[in-house]
Amino acid sequence: CRFRYVRDNTIVAVKQSVRLISCAIGTKRSALVIDSCFAEMFESCSRMSSGKVIANHEHRVQLAGLSIFAEEMIAGICKWNEEENSTRLSRSSIRVISSLASSVLPVIVSHPVWTLPTSFVCEFTAKHTSQNMKSWKHRIDNKEITSKHYRHGTSAEVLNSNAIVIGSLMSFINAFSRAMGAEITAHMPIILFPLLERASPIGNHSYVQSYARMYLGTITKSAGYEKIADLIVENFDYMLDLISRKLQRHAKERSPVDRSLLGVIDVLFWLVAQQGDEPDKLEKQTSTLLSQISMVAHMLNSFLCCVDLQFTPGATQGHLMDIVRIFKSINAFMDSSISNQIDDCRFDTDHATAQSTEEWLRRLDFELGIGPFGHTEDDDFEEEEISNSDEPEFHGTGCNDNDDNDIPSFAKEIVAINCILSRCSYFMYNANLQIQISCCDIILSGFQSLGKIGSFRKMRYGEASSNPLLPAIAEFWPPMITRLRSTSSSLLTAKTLSRSDLSIGQIMATDRDEAPSRKGLEIFMSKLLEI
């Protein structure tokens, strides 16, 4: 059953035999066999993780064979028709498969099965890296770790084998979704985040990334959604809650955040922000964003706690770039939220403007002694008493006592943008040109978002309303002026050299602590001037 000696010319016959066996023993017995396969896989991975068993490439391929065998058992239960691309399942079989999914899927996506390393990429801050190396050196000196513990630890062969195992597990999940159809939505909170984690371009094998994205598309179709973005938006609140809990745990333990988790955050917010830009989904997206801004603010707070506690001046460039990338995606989400809420209130704003114009005409009639229907003061007409109590008053929160409570205050958006701008104004002093340019783009985007809020308040409440852009400029403008002056001084003193005069090392040195080239200074200068 482990497909150990299967050749290319016999694999079709073996798969067909497994499907016939599953049909012969029935749905319930097949479900028990599938459950025992993943129980054996979980036990084997637990022993490998604890160091009790040193597994080589052959052992990991056997684990992948278990997953393939379970997948073919599912295909036999569902009587999958490749030509018609459909299944034939009774209601009793669907109940059995749903119960099997509740038992097997949490085991598949749990540690240590799903967390098998597939890439060498594992970034830490300089502080945690040095502590980790000291700990390992101490254990090696005391002979707590011998060569047998790391003989097969990080070789390329082992990583490729782990990628095969993870790919087979994702293929099994895909087979489950095809068998269950729309019923897979009940298990989406279990499988969606792990699949996004493996689809992230950070910390994953290229084979795992491509298959995760492909299977996400298939699962999306099985669940009844048109695009992956629709599926993510529908489960956005669950994803935010899970990410917040993971970040809180990292902040409490002061442990480094997995780069795959950072990649999930980046992809998640970009997809939701792009989904909010579609006009046909504006109304639904606006209500979704309004209900999730608090959760996004809570998640951002947890992320900032991790960044502030773990950040050191010697942090690696990859770690800083991940942080800046997440700031950029969250900033895009906030800008989409602000735009959607303003567009949703545009009709109310136009109505309020018409009312204010009518109020001004009534004031003019009162001063001239003319009634609304041409009556004068001498006529027998009871004038309507005009009070200033109906005029909108802005209290700094974006809404007033007499207007509807549906007017957005943008309080959480302003706080989130200011928190991101404060970090970016500090990261802008980093020596890496790519980080500097990304921080400039984030600061410019943040100023534009705050300017949208100020324009909305001015249009709604008049010149007396507060503009959140002004205090942000007052706070973050001095460091930008300082950076502009230092960049202009460096640009003036930089030597103008042709590309032929530079060595290959000087041309390609972008992440080292060397002085940036004149071209890089010009690009950074243009970004600062654009702000």
Image (spheres, rainbow, N blue to C red):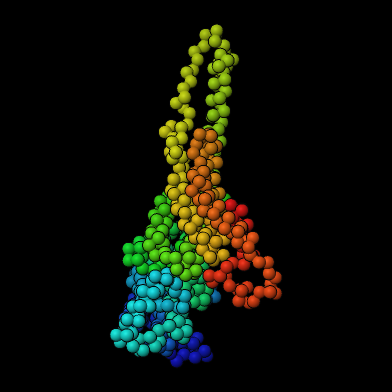
Which residue is more in the foreground, 245 or 149? Answer: 149
In the image, is residue 267 above or below residue 109?
above
Query: Where does residue 110 sit, x and y in percent of width and height?
Result: 36, 72
Query: Where does residue 189 sit, x and y in percent of width and height?
Result: 39, 63
In the image, is residue 149 above or below residue 489?
below
Going 31% across and 82% down the picture, which residue do you hit? 139
Going 63% across and 65% down the picture, which residue do you hit? 494
Q: Quadrant of residue 149?
A: bottom left
Q: Quadrant of residue 184?
A: bottom left
Q: Quadrant of residue 249?
A: bottom left
- How many numbered badges does the structure rendering display? 0
Query: Where does residue 272 sit, x and y in percent of width and height?
Result: 50, 57
In the image, is residue 529 above or below residue 129?
above
Q: Quadrant of the N terminus?
A: bottom left
Q: Would residue 429 be visible to someone looking at this image?
A: yes
Going 47% across and 77% down the picture, which residue do you hit? 119
